[in-house]
Image: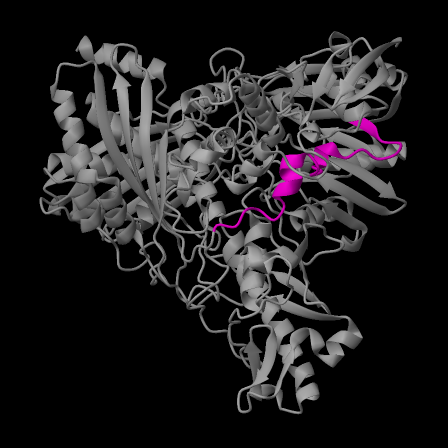
Amino acid sequence: MQTIDITLTVNDQQQTLPVKSNDTLLEVIRDYLDLTGSKEGCGEGVCGSCTVLLDGHPVRACLTLALEADGCAVTTVEGLADEDTLSPLQQSFIDHGAVQCGFCTPGMLISAKALLDENPSPDRQKLRQALSGNICRCTGYAKIVDAVAHAARPESGCPDCHTKDSGGDHD
Amino acid sequence: MAEQKNSYYTQGLSVPETPAPGEEPAFWKQTHVVGKRLPRVDAYERVSGAAVYPSDITLPNMIYGAVLRCPHPHANVTKVDVSRAKKMPGVRAVITGQTPEAKKLKWKYNDYSGPLFDTHCRFEGEAVAAVAADTHFQAWDAVRAIDVAYEVLPFVADHNKALSDDAPDIHDSGNLVGTDEYERGDVARGFDAADVVLEQEYHTQSELHTPMELHGCVAGWDKDRLTLWESTQGVYAVQSEIAEILNLPLSKVRVIGHYMGGGFGSKLKPGKYTVLAALLARQSGRPVKLILTREETYLCTGNRPASTMHLKAGVKKDGTLTACDFTCTGPSGAYPAGGTALVDWQIRDLYACDNVRCASKDVYINAGPARPFRAPGHPQASWALEQMMDDLADKIGMDPVALRLKNIPEISQGRNQPYTTTGLKQCIEKGAEQFGWKKAVERAKAHNQTDTHIKRGVGMGACVWFVGGGGPPSTVIIKLFRDGSVNLNMGASDIGTGTKTVMAMVAAEELGVAPEVIQIEHADTETTQYATPSGGSKTVPTESPTVRNAAIAVKRQLLEMASEDLNVPASDLDYEGAQIISRNDKNKRIKVTDVSRLKKRGVVVGVGYRGPNPPKKSVNPFAAQFCELAVNTKTGEMQILRFLSANDSGRVLDRLTYDNQVFGGIVMGIGFGMTEFRQLDARQTGRLCNRNWHDYKLPTALDVPVDMESLPIEIDDPEANNTGTKGLGEPVTIPTAAAIANALFMATGIRFTRAPVNPIEMRRHLTAKKEG
């Protein structure tokens, strides 16, 4: 099949790639660029595991044709950390135990980042709405919501956090 | 813990006493690491995108597999012509039932064994042929180019019709897989002694596992050695089954499963896809990646079987249960797969009752075979029993919590032997107290008296899990390097539950090192030790005592080595923090990292084995869950306001991963009770109607309670095993749906006997009630 060159800026690195007309953005990211952090959970746009930022907006990479992304900036989960220093959002996921099998995590992180970029201090209902397009089968979402809420307002501690009853060494 | 991060052997931490050779270790009294909230040891990999799951594997020269599946629920394959497919671009391997290397192979379901490709297709999604090509598009194009002819047969998709005369036989033996019966006491006399006898039919739907990572693997051969990167809960289980099917020595099958994206019971064994990938890889001489589509996983990677249950129960006015009579019919699917497995265990074991009779019937239907699903059988019977308990309580004017507390058994009645410990009473009592049960009931009832269309309800349910004590076999190896850092080597999979983290904590506790200096190697049949699959809520109680034994083996050797340095018998030595010290002469001491033989040898290797469970005792976890919800009686919408789960799972090892299980289990139970159901078109086509996450609804972040609470009930259980742990992953989801149903009853006065209760069902019942 014929290929067409597209230019993508993926995690701040600009590159030109030959893609086929039926290649999805997810295939380009995972198979051409070896960025396997973005996952395919369904391939039909329902689960959100493949969510990436396209020019700052969250999209389902499995439903986005690579050609549509020509000239765009793409942020994947690999682009969240500064070298091996995790972003506050990623660190908050770790600290709050928001990760179990981890397969939904990259998509959750990207959806959360998209929300916080747009609205730095969402209330918890907004936060739930923003994450409701990402399915998780392990966690029951509670700690993911906690983690994002904490990343949005680290100075407020975790007053509504599900780990508040710890008595342990949390926070 | 920050100060420990950079020091290897920790200063000042007391290290548990090392038992003499042949002696069992003492129960931990005070712990320093165990019980804390420790974030996952592999969290960095999981949040950075660095973790490599089997579906992320790409090998040089790798090609892609795809499977042709029968589109009918019941059919005979009369022709498979692959000549066109073989000639298509990129196609490198095609396998059918006529391919010599596939023809002789068998595939098993429990005791049933049949051909790998059976021309008699008994469910929609049965494999008919498989292809591998350079790209997955080419593979799927080739699948579509295979010319197949089917003789479509009559089907039965409803388990309640499977045994009727006009149902087609799915197997030559008929449609009955098997029956199971149980009886204790005299049920008729029990009912005679009752003041109130109630009976009710209950239904639960088929629920699908749908883990986030698709089922599948990458298979590659190095001449006669097969390597599989499989998304699995147990690498050794995959190894043994694949070696048996392909007639290979175990040593020639390597299974690697470092990360995996969830299984919930559906990945305890290899799939037929695993065998197909191996055959395609052999035929093409290339590694083959075969990851199922989401739709395929809905059809053929297992389910929680539906159930039709009947329960009759009697109670005295004082709350004493006098008799329970339970029957259940459930479908295995197209092959024997435990359609009613463990379905009556709640009835047999949970509440004290002298007279109990259970009978279950497992039947074939033309649908994908079941696989174990998080607490197989248990949420089904819980749906019946817990609602019945509430109805009985209502009839005798007793509080539901009080009725349950009245019937706490002293022993395991199902096994007729004592439990090592039972926290059932404490789970109910302390859970109710923490939840504020009495006030919540009063508040809801008062609220419902007011003129409002939003009604409130509170409800509860309790449970016991059938096993959860773990047990042998398991082997773990701990290597302690000369600088005091540690490598922990175990075969168990971390299926997202935090196994690696918890085991690091156990090793840290016993060795007195910081968890940060422990590196874990796991889930690889070539480089790690034997373990059974992570399932049955047994990984913590199986592996953690084994890890502890391995750590003790390290410590014993270090004492022997230090005795040479100190010229003191090893039996006179013990640890004091990072030092080994003579009990009789405190001046004789040596830093562990200064021990000569450790320095010279570079490493000490300790091997731990899982010891036996206590004889004639039953090790079981218990739970009680409480919920409060609101129902909009105009729209049928429901909102769960809060949930509390009180769990007796023995000692808490990591409170962070413990709470993960609790919240995740509650939400999966909400899915079972309110959103999820497999819909077969039982009347017309027999095909699956909802084969994606859009039509099969999982709870989302908007559907879960804002307020969830985890209340561990920790009871010392030194008899269970040397860490005092019991399983947690399954009891957290058993009584959830029933607790919701009981709360819905309080809110609406409607007894929902059919799960799930979604807004459409709710609306239907509200309308029916209004119209009388």
Side of B53 relative to B410 (left or right): right
Q: Residue at x 53, y 29 (%)?
A: A136
| Left or right: residue B179 compared with residue B406 | right
Q: Quadrant of residue B414?
A: bottom left
Residue B464 coordinates in the image, percent (x, y) = 36, 48
Residue B257 to residue B636: above or below: below
Q: Which residues are magenta?
A: B37-65
- Which residue is painted at 49% across and 21% down in the image? A132
Query: Quarter holding the C terminus of chain B?
Result: top left
Query: Which residue occupies the foreground of this view, B339 or B521?
Result: B521
Colouring used for the render? one colour
Q: Residue at x 24, y 36 (%)?
A: B388
Residue B418 coordinates in the image, percent (x, y): 33, 63
> Is residue B546 among what the camera can see?
no
Q: Nearer the viewer, residue B61 or B517?
A: B517
Residue B381 found in image quarter: top left
The residue at the point 45 percent across, 58 percent down is B725
Q: Is residue B60 magenta?
A: yes
Q: Position of residue B577 (x, y in %)?
A: 56, 73
Specify whether B464 is left or right of B241.
Answer: left
Is residue A95 shown above or below B737? below
Inspect this view and state whether residue A165 appears.
Answer: yes
Does residue B514 sit above or below B71 in this rendering?
below
Q: Is residue B94 above or below residue B279?
A: above
Q: Is residue A65 magenta?
A: no
Front position in the image: B386 or B635: B635
Q: Position of residue B524 (x, y in %)?
A: 72, 50
Q: Is residue A8 left or right of residue B665?
A: right
| Label total for image | 0
